[in-house]
Amino acid sequence: MATLSLQNVQKSYGGLQVLHGIDVELEDGGFLVLLGPSGCGKSTLLNLIAGLDDISAGDIRIDGRSVVELAPKDRNIAMVFQSYALYPTMTVERNIGFGLEMRGINGIERSAAVKKAADLLQISHLLDRRPANLSGGQRQRVAMGRAIVRNPDLFLFDEPLSNLDAKLRAEMRTEIKRLHGRLGTSVVYVTHDQIEAMTLGTKVAVMKGGYIQQFADPQTIYEKPANMFVAGFIGSPPMNFVTGTLTSDGRLARFEAPGVRVEAPMSSGEIFRAKAAVLGIRPEELKIADVTGSMLTGTIDVIEPTGPDTIVTVRVGDQAVVARLPSRFSSKAGDGVYLRAELAGLSLFDAVTEMRIQL
Amino acid sequence: MAATRRSRRMAADILTYFVLVSMSLFCIGPIAWMFLTSLKLEADIVTQTMQYIPNRITFQNYVAIWTQSSFPVLIGNSFIVTLITVIVCLATGTLAAYAFSRYTFKGRNTLMLGYLVVRMFPAVMMIIPLYVVLRSVGLIDSRIGLALAYTSFLLPLFVWMLKGFFDAAPKELESAARIDGSTRFGAMLWIVIPLARNGLVASSIFVAIAAWNEFLFALMLTTGQGSRTWPVGLQLMVGEFQLPWGVLAAGGILSILPVMLMFALVQRVMVQGLTAGAIKG
Ligand SMILES: Nc1ncnc2c1ncn2[C@@H]1O[C@H](COP(=O)(O)OP(=O)(O)OP(=O)(O)O)[C@@H](O)[C@H]1O
Ligand SMILES: [Mg+2]
């Protein structure tokens, strides 16, 4: 168990800067998720923490101690790779015990530790096999076994579930959450799956192009995205963006677009004069309203029942808005509809900078 | 319709086999002829009418070349030179290939290209400078000197081949080993080399065969019995001692036996070696 602190971490390959000053703090026993699209530098950051690659500038501290000068083996970390990286020439037992073997732990102690880890992951019956003779889910468990057997200060996971099918992925996600609760070891977890990020993380860092876009707990990331990238990246179906104008007198703000009118009290006291802005509304925040309480007025374009709820696409002015509504939904395409949402569930962004506007 | 397609396919097959078989015969012919000659009595070799299949078979020629000439010494020298070449290539080439495969450093590509350029020039061009260099360090007419000369043009081949095999070994395995407690060198030794084992064997055998068969360098860089290898020795026997043809043929057959063995091995290993890297995690 340990804290992790990344301070202005930078990485360049030749002239190409891949990470631009990453700052992250993870509490003891925390679960940090690095979330972002492909190529944003997640794996690079993980490799820097592991010491597999050299940092270009900045500092990495585990439990307050700078580790940038230490070799990977001296950082007391364990890592699970996307490809699992099991040693193909060794049995499962030796794969799991290899780290202990390298550290000179004797055979009896080693088998006991391997057995304990294997029991925890329910792979005791596979110990004599080779990785080639295991299913994807079993390999994944062996890879986890190899990580937990050493009792490291920090677990690093690089997209550990991305090679599994949807059902197994959900199962292993729960398993990882259970393991984390049980072992209490701090985790850094890379993924581009927002569900994994939301369900597992105590802290989420959303990355793009080598920058951290937002670093907060999952709830804040979801409810108060710092910019339109974060807002659009998290959530499925994604957040609706409605472009319009923002006007305020310092106490009351009003957002307007064809078919849209939202008023909200504000505390910042800022004055806006028909500023170009974007209103962000999550589909699940939208509800059917009557004329008096409505924020959006439009006509129904498409209705897609999914079982538990119904995804409805509504034309509002010349923009499309998607709403996730209850399954007992009686209207049909072409009908007029009024929609509203709680003010707390709305986000406003500057149309030019795409940054969140705090009212 | 189907019938004509089938008959056309058959014609193509027949043509393919005809070309392949005739080419194989063309290549194997001289070796087969040498083998038959080595089994003949001297009187049956130079005759009025050509005798293809020997009437009388004898192993006398094999006994003669082994007991009545310097052939065992030649084979011994060849063996030692080949062994030194392979060991030097293994010791230095493995590390070089690993570095080329895993590290990015200044001048890496230039260096790799340089390795290739060495092989661009014909051996005759290299031989005079090599001669001068070896003479000035006193390694002319020595087995180590000859092995070093071989290394100079076989090492690049070895490194390039092995680099391909190292490239095929997943990098994440090494990363895992380094986190598990290995040093970089340990990860190479315990993880990468076992994975690239077949490639290592194949590359070594290629080097060994090339060193075993080499003629020109051996001719120029050795002068005495002490370091002369079999290709040169055998060639010299033709002129020097007026050895009977049957005995020479026996010497030739004995000399290429190890090569045939190694080829059989390399063929098996190459097939495995090329697919071994594909196994993931
Ligand atoms: N060794 C390298 N040399 C040069 N550029 C590199 C190297 N490794 C990574 N990069 C670049 O750094 C950027 C980030 O790569 P990284 O692997 O960290 O992305 P990622 O966020 O893990 O993406 P993915 O989700 O696809 O795994 C990419 O643009 C990549 O091309
Ligand atoms: Mg990655």
Image: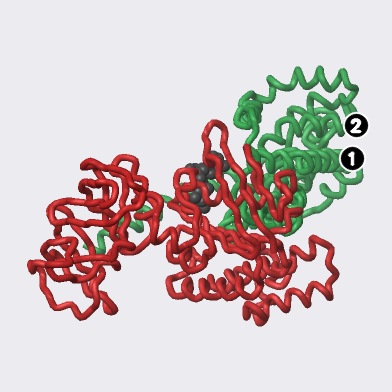
Indicate yes or no: mark 1 CB to ligand 1 under 8 Å. no
Which chain is depicted green? B
The kind of residue on which mark 1 rests is Val
Residue for point 73% across, 58% down: A76
Which circle's residue, 2 or 1, is located before the other in the chain?
Answer: 1
Image quadrant for the N terminus of chain B? bottom left
Residue for point 63% across, 24% down: B121
Q: Looking at the picture, tell me which residue is in the foreground, A83 or A56.
A: A56
Q: Which residue is mark 2?
A: B225
Percent x, y of residue B235: 78, 32
Q: Chain of mark 1?
A: B
Colour option used:
by chain
Which chain is depicted red? A
Q: Chain of mark 2?
A: B
**In the rendering, which numbered label is found on residue A170?**
none
**A200 relative to A158, above or below:** below
